[in-house]
Image (cartoon, grey):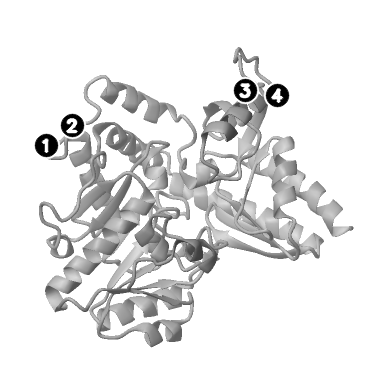
Amino acid sequence: MRENSNNIYSSKDISKKGADFLMHTYSRMDVVFSKAKMQYLWDIEGKKYTDFTSGYGCLNVGHSNPAVIKALKEQIGKIIQPSNIFYNIPQVELAEELCKLSGFGEKVFFSNSGAEAVEGAIKLARKYSTDKYGKRRYEIITFNNSFHGRTLGALAATAQAKKQNVFEPLLSGFKYSDINDTGSVKKQIDGNTCAVIIELIQGEGGINVCKKEFISELKKICEENEILLIIDEIQTGFSRTGSVFAYQQYDIVPDIIVVAKSLGGGMPIGAVISTDRICSAFTPGTHGSTFGGNAASCSAGIAVIRYLLENDLAGKAEMLGKYLIEKLRMLQSKYQIIQDVRGMGLMLAIEFKKPVAAALIKDALKNGLILNKVSENTIRFLPSLVINKKDIDFLIRFLDKYIKEEDEK
């Protein structure tokens, strides 16, 4: 299906201009989108696409969700960005909603992105621990194949050497363990350990899911050693895995969580959520953000939370996630080339035995599907939670045809 377009540019025109004026920090594709509605996008030429990436997991409520647009229009007409030396209504209301949703949170700090939220959590954990236990207690344990952001502190927490090496020296004080291996965690703990940061599902790392027994034991280890447990919910949060937050399926209560991505419904926002006891370490001047918690982004955040609760997107993610993973496993049973299918809710991956991911996503784009690879062998599925079975069937038909051809080579 195509829509008429009055754009004076073509995708090729914009791609060339972009290559001239934008820093080359992404391997961009030569498609330019000019319109979006929920799970669908249209390029400048009018071609329609079904999106199974949702802007790298930023759009759980869909592209240009009408509820988010309405909230933004109303707020922008009033005030967009007061200084943080004043309270603003959407910021206070969103902080209250996040505390209620978390079930444990009592205070919130707002940032503009997930990486900034991670930076804030690192500072909060270190400040709390050094104030309480002394200046040497600042080390943090993270996990191999994790991803917590590209700013210098978040990059130090991201245990992927290929992303770190070109930016050394990194922020010091980080040690790395392996998920689902409590022994590897215990080996890294000493009197200087202040916190553990973990993704319950490693997104950029390949959709690697933490086992419930491991997280239960990790929580116990943290409690016994008075170490803060920080859960990175940037990609898993806001109903993606079948619950509002992924940790709610693990029967634990973290000390700190960081969120971002889908909180803004497409607007830039991140947040650190914790308790009064821990947040008391932050006092005026210890941390801040010029645009963090601006009224426009926070109004979008309130609309997102209301939409996902009123429309039970957590339940929908669980139901459609089971449908999609069942279909992917049917493909796995048919084709030897598929190594594994894994994930939770609508955060899933298919891994191949050979490096076909790059060619697959290019062919998918030609066929009106937006997919994402996290390695040369692995495709990640992060669709908006408003997709339907018809969208999934469209994806599976494409994959079935493509994989069949690859499997026969």
Q: CA distance from mark 3 to mark 1?
A: 42 Å
Q: Residue at x 57, y 32 (%)?
A: 20
| SS state under label 1 | loop
User: Is 82 placed left or right of 73 in the picture?
Assistant: left
* Three-letter code for the amino acid on which mark 3 is drawn: Ile
* Few, some or many residues within 10 Å of mark 2 (<14, 14–19, 20+): some
Look at discs 2 and 4 and give the one toward the viewer: 2
Q: CA distance from mark 2 to mark 4?
A: 44 Å
Disc 1 to disc 4, how far (Cα)?
49 Å
The residue sitting at the top extreme is 6
**Residue drawn 53% across and 46% down?**
25
Q: Which residue is mark 1?
A: 86
- Residue under label 2, please give it: 82
Question: What's the residue type where badge 4 is placed?
Answer: Met
Q: Earlier in the sequence, mark 2 or mark 4?
A: 4
Which label belongs to residue 1? 4
Q: Earlier in the sequence, mark 2 or mark 3?
A: 3
Looking at the rendered image, the quarter that the N terminus falls into is top right
Counting from the top left corner in percent of width and height, residue 124 is at: 22, 62
Identify residue for label 3: 44
Residue 22 versus residue 143: which sits nearer the camera? Answer: 22
